[in-house]
Image: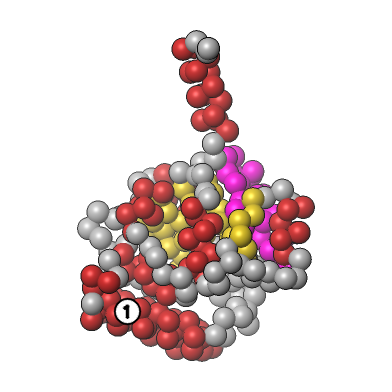
Amino acid sequence: MTTESEQIAAAVIALREAPEVSVVLPCLNEAKTVGKCIEKALAALQQAGIAGEVIVADNGSTDGSVDICRRLGVTVVHQPRRGYGNAYLKGIAAAHGRYVLMADADDTYDLSELPRFIELLRDGHDMVIGNRFAGRILPGAMDWSHRYLGNPILSGLLRVMFSTSVGDAHSGMRAFTREAYEKLRLKSGGMEFASEMVVNAGRPDCVWLKCPLRTIRVTARLSCVRCGMDGAIFVTCCCAAPRTCF
């Protein structure tokens, strides 16, 4: 039977060991880049003195991505249901941090910017969404269809229909508090997960901020048409039947 002082000591140790930040990366056959992303995230956490963990939500990789993650000592959770949103729902559910940062595992985003997002959350914001258009896009890093068609159109729809100020609806680097995430009640399994987050973050009790991103490392493999249609369909459904979305 433990004494009260022993229980307090155990609680203090557990608190120290609990991560403040959980970095969640969805992964589907990203063997070429997932290791780089993990290393950058871990380095950013260490250099900023942030207690954190990295969780990779694998969506059925067959190219050795999982082995790379395990060799680097990070947590891997498996999501058999395919989809961007499904991977994040699984990965975030496994996160232990007070703050969660999400980013793609294809080395699109500069994870050395991670501390900037966390500082903004510590300052009282519930959510921080990266804005690539307010930062610097490296030459060749974003396909013209993403840069001038899909993303601007979807961002515009969200601003008009839901009075949001989002400038980059498909930014894949975002951070939020666990309390805010639970309030959002996200459930979309595909790419519309990103739009659902923006729409639901329009709640009066959610304080969010846009954060310029300095760089994009590589060209994304996602289809502009597919991403745009998923987001547009979700937005249209929310307007037609809001109870099904919120």
Q: Which residue is labeled 1 in the image?
A: 235
Rendered residue at 72%/48% (across/down): 73
Q: Position of residue 178 (x, y in %)?
A: 41, 48
Rendered residue at 23%/81% (across/down): 240
Rendered residue at 32%/79% (across/down): 235
Q: In the rendered view of the protein, which quadrant contains the C terminus?
A: bottom left
Q: Position of residue 236 (x, y in %)?
A: 30, 82
Q: Is residue 88 rendered to the left or right of residue 30?
A: left
Query: In this picture, is 18 found above or below 144?
Result: above
Rendered residue at 54%/64% (across/down): 87
Q: How many marks?
A: 1
Q: Position of residue 97 (x, y in %)?
A: 50, 44
Query: In this picture, is 203 found above or below 123?
Result: below
Whether residue 213 appears in this view of the structure is no
Whether residue 153 appears in this view of the structure is yes
Tell me which segment is drawn in magenta: 30-56
Residue type marked 1: Val
